[in-house]
Amino acid sequence: MCGIAGVVGANGVLAAHVKTMIDQIQFRGRDGHGIETLGNRVVMGHARLSVVDYEHGKQPMPNTDNTVWVTFNGEIYNYVELREELKAKGYQFKSRSDSEVLVHLWREEGEKMLDRLIGMFAFFIWDTKLDRGILVRDRQGIKPCFIADYKGGIAFASEMKAILSLPDMPREVNASGLKDVFAFNYCPPPQTCFKGITHLEPGCYLLFEGDKKPVKKSYWKWPFSAEKRTPSFEEFEALTDEAIRIQMRFDVDGGLYLSGGVDSSIVAYHLKKQWPHARLEAFGLNFPNQDFSEFGYSEEVAKLLDIDLQEARITPDMIPEIANKVVYHAEQPHGDFSFFLFYLLAKRANEQNRVVMFTGDGPDEAMGGQFIHRHAQKEVSLAEYLDAICYMDNATRARVLNPDFERSTPTPAQRFAEMLEPWKHLAPVEQMAAYECVYLLPGNNLLKGERMGALWSTENRSPMMDHRVSELFIRLPAEQKFQQGITKYYLKNYAATKLSHDLIFKKKTMPTLPIGEWMKTTLREWTREAFSRIDNAYVNKVAALAMLDEHVAGTHNHTRSLRTILMSQLWLENCVNAATRQKAA
């Protein structure tokens, strides 16, 4: 887990400005900071969390003749194999880090190098000899990379707070992005809730050449239209073992987040086979409300595989204590309260000095598990899908949103149609998977672990997010993703050959909080106080308070709408309004 920042081609940018950017995200890299100025065109910075080669991995890092420089966040898992190839070609290395592989591979192959990389990454390379470089993001968007036009050039960073720290960079709400939050519970990329700042899309890079305007190019896309095939279980097992083998390359203590679901259980099984230490330690979440807790499943898997399991417990009183920090580090409003769960998991791992944590991220979105599990008895249409994922229906939006704000941008249905346009030729279930992989995954689901982990100096590794595994999932025929009322059909049948059949085929659950019930009781006054601070620019305060009263009285269940309003209000306070945004830092 590191942080990168920089400015390319802007007027009057100094090293001190980029240092301020790095200062804003210094929590991402507790082991060292660096700034490098290259001519009058480029200033790049880095905050380092050392995972491999503590002594020799300082960044920004040059090649041997100081003509190619990189600032890099992430991990290149196949860096050992790439380094051996480069050494055979005469390249010399002064470190064991994967960062140094990038500067030499750039000199050897240029942009074609991107096809060779297996990993999660965002990095900027600048070649002073050729006066060109690239800003790159990994294929699925595991690592963040934000960009903004700035004084005739481009500013980039791992987090938006770094870009917003630049002189004369406005901190203004993007109404279109915020309105999407009230529909989809998050802001679908590439736009953000800040005007002028966007994501660099996954699988893309910006090419900089001299004084030319940067050009965005794609080097990878999800293979939604590829020919379908069902691999043997032996093929999947070998690929998963290989993904874990190369992800096991780190020099710090690690562990596993274990929910007891099929995905994390498969990772636990494969990880245990290769774990180099006497014991594999895992962390699982537990709640006082057992209807929402999966900890019993975590205990069952841990016992089956002989894994040491530790509890990360969450209670209602913790929510107000950590809410401002969660929102500040998420940087955008997310009505998804599982951000709080990842915060507490990462905190627990940090308390045990664990830096690298394995997860089961990946299969849900590619195999339809994020949504279809709620409707597992029948096929669903795109209209039904939109109704299910839209967190405020038309009547609720008309009731609670400021009318000018509500009319300012396209409706949720129009936005959803825009997002699905490239895949409208596919079957509905494939269009749903495309939406979840391209928008939901990098825009919300991967952010939870990445951002909350960054806050606590932990780095998540997800073997089933190895792009080769992801491509295998996408290429599965529809009947291997959903069959006989069973989601992730292929994966569950594979898991049943390794683990308990009853455990694997239990009813699907999702890690979440009983926030709706807590809003009626323990969190009622805290929620009411936050709503009382609403200024009506986006949400009607009177209507929001009335909805809360109806929810508390039990006449209506407004959980989904209320939590989105609540997190949006906290975001406005902590990330937008200058008077309060430093409170959570």
Image (cartoon, rainbow, N blue to C red):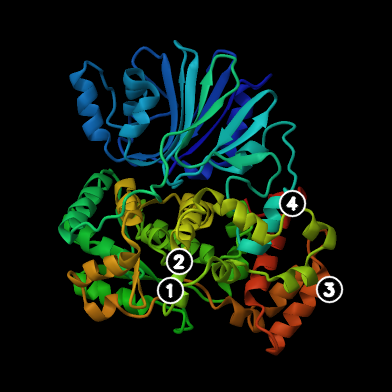
Q: In terms of secondary structure, where does tag 2 sit?
A: loop
Q: CA distance from mark 2 to mark 1?
A: 7 Å
Query: Would you name the residue on which mark 2 appears?
Result: 370
Query: Would you name the residue on which mark 3 appears?
Result: 542
In which quarter of the view is residue 517 placed? bottom right
Which label sits in the foreground, 4 or 1? 1
Q: In terms of secondary structure, where does tag 3 sit?
A: helix
In which quarter of the view is residue 395 placed? bottom right
Q: Nearer the viewer, residue 538 or 472?
A: 472
Name which residue type carries label 1. Answer: His
Query: Would you name the residue on which mark 1 appears?
Result: 373
Q: CA distance from mark 1 to mark 3?
A: 36 Å
Q: Nearer the viewer, residue 101 or 219?
A: 219
Q: Which mark is residue 175?
A: 4
Q: In terms of secondary structure, where does tag 1 sit?
A: helix
Rendered residue at 73%/79% (across/down): 548
Instruction: Report crowding for label 4: few under 14, some 14 to 19, many 20 or more residues within 10 A (C-alpha).
Output: some
